[in-house]
């Protein structure tokens, strides 16, 4: 259906049938419009934006990739861009300005009324990936000494422009946050009841400088649709709603996946990212890991005479390397994910160490016996096979523990635990595996 609509839009643009195109776009959800125009050329997108209602246009514009936004800013007239920018959500507007060149941002800021311009600049002054960047200033709040009737009147007056009306914030006269109130509570309460009698005190909140990942975790923990954002004096300044958090969860998951793969984070989608950016993000890690992995050459060189005397030992080298990397990768993935879900904390490192020693030992015994039996298909030398089995046991225990402990080490140094996984674990397990295997095999066969 999406492909058909894209084709229809292309045909309508080619024929110049903008009247039909406008009718097609009318009353469409912004997400549907975005999907309809996603594959269009930027020049075709510009035509569509000229036909969209200003509110829909602003929301669809915020969903585009930064390079497309910049092209459209340069393609549309000042009046068209002014309409879009003014109708964008403040946090989306701040995110857009963050990506654009300084001269373009200066021009776009001039399109905004003074109050919105100051509001946008204030959001941009908050740290990147903080609650201040994420929050919306459009919310409903009531004072504790209001009656339910007065509070409902305020909801009716300001609720239309608010991002949420289901959670209403209760404040003191100076806007100090003291509690929350659900719309349901207001509707079913008696009109002359005071808000002070029905609100829930001491609500969860975040500060403007709180990291967005922490905001998401807090909303998930308390099952919130919206959370208050306060300044250092506990005054209510904004709200973060669940719609924004869904995007943050996806963004944070993408960052973790990229880091676990041993590369810097790419913020734009695959086809909107230059190959040079991918090379820049991946090359430093690949070079660093290559140099670390090349230490294996020195280890092998040290045992060169031993390998020349008993060549069959080399048959098990790749098995040792791969098994250690696999075991370490599995344990690091389990711990990193558990940390992300809040199931494992830094203080739990000792419990994790003991558990992973136990798990690694059991896995090592099973895999060692398997390799010992499988080894007779390669060599009839029982000492060679037994030394390979013992080595594999120790390698699995080593890799399992290292894979589990490195994320704790990263967290202790305030480094994202996701960096301590994937290729890094594999490389360390490779080095350790080769060293353990040659040391055990050399000792046993020399005896």
Image: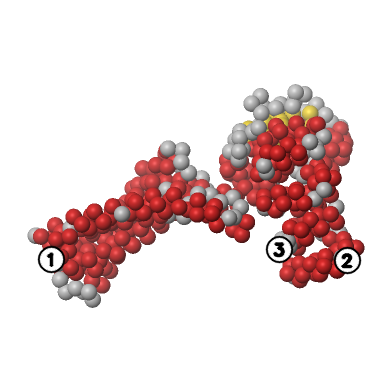
> Callout 1 environment at 10 Å: few (<14), some (14 to 19), or many (20+)?
few
The extreme right residue here reads: 19
In-image side of 93 versus 426 (left or right): right
Q: Secondary structure at mark 2?
A: loop
| Count of marks overlaid on the render | 3
* Res. 139 visible in picture: no
The residue lying toward the viewer, choosing from 95 and 319, is 95
Q: CA distance from mark 1 to mark 3?
A: 63 Å
**In the image, which is nearer the foreground, mark 2 or mark 1?**
2
In-image side of 309 versus 201 (left or right): left
The residue lying toward the viewer, choosing from 103 and 375, is 103
Mark 3 / mark 2, whichever is N-terminal: 2
Mark 2 / mark 1, whichever is N-terminal: 2
Figure quadrant of residue 318: bottom left
Q: Secondary structure at mark 1?
A: helix
In-image side of 58 versus 378 (left or right): right
The residue at 33%/62% (across/down) is 322
Residue matched to label 3: 39
Mark 1 / mark 3, whichever is N-terminal: 3
The residue at 73%/36% (across/down) is 106
Residue matched to label 1: 309
The C terminus lies in quadrant: bottom left
Q: CA distance from mark 3 to mark 2?
A: 20 Å
The residue at 67%/50% (across/down) is 66
Residue matched to label 2: 17
Residue 141 x/y as whole percent = 78, 34
* Res. 162 visible in picture: yes
The residue lying toward the viewer, choosing from 373 and 167, is 373
């Amino acid at each position: 259906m999406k492909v058909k609509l894209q084709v229809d839009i292309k045909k309508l643009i080619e024929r110049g049938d903008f009247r039909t195109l406008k009718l097609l776009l009318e009353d469409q959800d912004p997400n549907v419009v975005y999907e309809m125009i996603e594959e269009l050329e930027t020049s075709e997108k510009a035509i569509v934006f000229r036909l969209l209602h200003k509110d829909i246009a602003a929301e669809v514009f915020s969903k585009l990739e930064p390079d497309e936004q910049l092209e459209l800013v340069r393609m549309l007239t000042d009046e068209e861009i002014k309409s879009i920018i003014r109708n964008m959500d403040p946090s989306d507007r701040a995110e857009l300005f963050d990506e654009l060149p300084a001269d373009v941002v200066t021009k776009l800021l001039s399109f905004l009324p003074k109050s919105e311009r100051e509001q946008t600049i204030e959001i941009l002054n908050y740290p990147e990936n903080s609650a201040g960047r994420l929050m919306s200033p459009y919310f409903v709040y009531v004072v504790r000494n209001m009656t339910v009737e007065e509070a409902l009147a305020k909801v009716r007056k300001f609720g239309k422009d608010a991002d949420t009306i289901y959670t209403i914030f209760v404040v003191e006269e100076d806007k100090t946050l003291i509690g929350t109130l659900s719309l349901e509570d207001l509707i079913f309460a008696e009109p002359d009841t005071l808000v002070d009698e029905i609100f829930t005190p001491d609500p969860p909140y975040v500060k403007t400088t709180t990291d967005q990942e922490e905001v998401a975790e807090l909303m998930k923990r308390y099952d919130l649709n919206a959370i208050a954002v306060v300044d250092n004096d506990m005054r209510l300044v904004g709200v973060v709603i669940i719609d924004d958090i869904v995007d943050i969860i996806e963004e944070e998951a993408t960052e973790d996946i990229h880091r676990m793969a041993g590369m810097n984070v790419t913020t734009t989608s695959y086809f909107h990212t230059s190959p040079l950016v991918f090379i820049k993000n991946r090359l430093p890690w690949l070079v660093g890991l290559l140099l670390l992995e090349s230490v294996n050459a020195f280890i092998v060189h040290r045992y060169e005479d031993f390998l020349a005397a008993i060549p069959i030992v080399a048959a098990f080298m790749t098995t040792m390397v791969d098994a250690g990397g696999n075991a370490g990768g599995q344990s690091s993935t389990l711990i990193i994910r558990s940390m992300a879900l809040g199931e494992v904390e830094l203080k739990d490192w000792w419990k994790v160490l003991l558990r992973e020693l136990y798990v690694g030992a059991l896995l090592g015994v099973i895999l060692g016996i398997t390799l010992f039996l499988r080894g007779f298909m390669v060599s009839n030398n029982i000492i060679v096979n037994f030394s390979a089995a013992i080595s594999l046991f120790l390698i699995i225990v080593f890799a399992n523990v290292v894979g589990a402990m490195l994320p704790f080490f990263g967290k202790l140094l305030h480094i994202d635990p996701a960096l301590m996984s994937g290729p890094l674990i594999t490389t360390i397990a490779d080095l350790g595996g080769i060293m353990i295997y040659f040391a055990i095999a050399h000792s046993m066969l020399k005896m």
